[in-house]
């Protein structure tokens, strides 16, 4: 009986924390948008490398980027503590980490559309975490990251499936 009530509580969680529904909607829209971008990238590809990136590598890289954003927004204190301890260990690691952050940030600034997607997803994840905190639900960081990553991937897959089932009529 207790298991059944826990399961019902878990199924009703998106309605108690509506920002989870917003996060799911944002990730579904991202999946829908990415499914629409792939044919455009294939048509605009000038080199074989661009064609190869737009084909089989596009979806894994976009999903990895989304998962990285979710993990960074779910466990910021844990990750920043580890990163600062790593940077305090040596000046060479400090330089490498700083250059990596600056180069990655510069690449995102060169492609503002990608930066806006990352910022929108990060805002939705942080709002969902705030809504869960309002309900006094604070799972361990790894469990929260896994749950939110699964939620975002489910939304992305739903958006992609919606695009495929409609045959691209939304674009």
Image: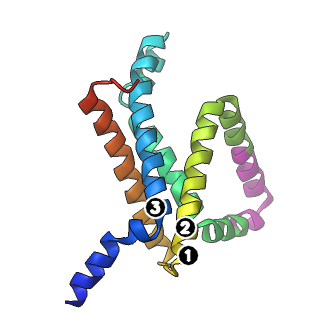
Q: Which residue is mark 2?
A: 129
**Numbered circle sitting on residue 22:** none
The residue that mark 1 highlights is 133
The tally of labels here is 3
Side (left or right) of 90 relative to 124: right
Q: Position of residue 137 (x, y in %)?
A: 49, 79
Chief secondary structure of the magenta span? Answer: helix
* In contact (CB < 8 Å): disc 3 and disc 1: no
> CA separation, marks 3 and 2?
8 Å
Picture quadrant of residue 35: top left
Relative to 95, say whether 4 is above or below: below
Res. 16 image quadrant: bottom left
* Residue 147 found in image quarter: bottom left
Q: Nearer the viewer, residue 9 or 146?
A: 9
Count neighbours of disc 3 (C-alpha within 10 A) and say few if under 14, some if 14 to 19, many if 20 or more. Answer: many
Local SS, label 3:
helix
Residue 153 position in % (x across, y down): 38, 51
**Residue 57 visible:** no
Q: Residue at x 52, y 63 (%)?
A: 128
Residue bounds of the magenta highlight:
86-101
Q: Which mark is residue 20?
A: 3
SS at mark 1 in the image: helix
Secondary structure beneath disc 2?
helix
Q: CA distance from mark 1 to mark 2?
A: 6 Å
Is tag 3's residue or tag 1's residue first in the polypeptide sequence?
A: 3
Residue for point 40% across, 39% down: 31
């Amino acid at each position: 009986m207790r298991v059944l009530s826990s399961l019902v509580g878990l199924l009703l969680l998106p309605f108690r924390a509506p920002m989870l529904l917003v996060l799911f909607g944002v990730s579904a829209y991202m999946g829908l948008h990415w499914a629409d971008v792939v044919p455009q990238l294939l048509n605009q590809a000038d080199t074989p490398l661009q064609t190869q990136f737009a084909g089989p590598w596009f979806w894994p890289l976009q999903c990895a980027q989304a998962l990285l954003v979710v993990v960074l927004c779910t466990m910021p204190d844990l990750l920043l503590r580890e990163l600062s301890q790593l940077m305090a260990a040596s000046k060479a690691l400090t330089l490498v980490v700083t250059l990596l952050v600056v180069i990655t940030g510069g690449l995102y600034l060169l492609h503002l559309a990608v930066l806006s997607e990352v910022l929108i997803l990060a805002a939705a994840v942080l709002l969902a975490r705030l809504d869960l905190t309002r309900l006094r639900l604070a799972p361990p960081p790894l469990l929260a990251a896994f749950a939110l990553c699964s939620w975002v991937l489910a939304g992305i897959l739903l958006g992609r499936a919606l695009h495929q089932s409609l045959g691209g009529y939304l674009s």
